[in-house]
Image (cartoon, grey):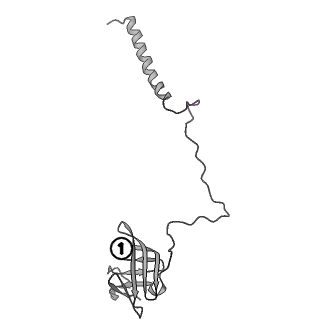
Amino acid sequence: MQRTPLCGVVGGMRNAFLLAVPAVLAACSGEPALKDPTQNNSVAAEPLGMPDAGQPAPPSSATPAPVAEIPEAFRGEWNRVAADCGTDRNASRLRVEAGSLRFYESSGTVEDVAGKGRTITVRARYSGEGQTEERTTRFSLSQDGKTLRSEGMDRVRCR
């Protein structure tokens, strides 16, 4: 097949069209044309602010401080079975600290304590077994301070 002059014109137009398509699309992108192909169109980021050496750093939010503390008389390790104190043999173990409650598989950060004397109500945010919840628990301490009742269970103080 021999080429005619018309084929040369059509082929040239086709090549010109194919080259023009990317140029038209680039013009529609909304990005300004680059004078220097080594530059980019990114916006310069503002530098991160660092605290002055004379100012204290802001408080960490990793472990919030408790709003209230559990009274000293309630603090310590408690277990349903005295022989299991200090071990992991019993799931009833409870460790009461000023700002936290630690059960067998969960722990709670104290958010509020109400009451006085031998009965208190503690609101805490618990996490454990992949869950987080807020719960309010009532604790009653025996007259001799050796038994703690909560959620229908009596626990003895571990020594």
Magenta segment: 30-44
Amino acid bearing label 1: Glu
Q: Position of residue 85 (x, y in %)?
A: 37, 85
* Direction front: furthest residue: 115
> How would you classify the magenta stretch by its main secondary structure?
loop
Residue 90 or residue 154, whichever sits in front: 154
Q: Quadrant of the N terminus?
A: top left
- Quick check: 133 above or below 144? above
Q: Residue shown at 35%/76% (left/top)?
A: 104
Residue ID for mark 1: 105
Left/right of residue 127 with respect to residue 69 in the rendered view = left
Taking the magenta stretch, the answer to whether it contains residue 20 is no
- Quick check: 141 above or below 122? below
Q: Residue shown at 49%/79% (left/top)?
A: 69
Q: Position of residue 15 (x, y in %)?
A: 42, 17
Badge 1 marks a residue whose secondary structure is loop
Q: Number of numbered discs present?
A: 1
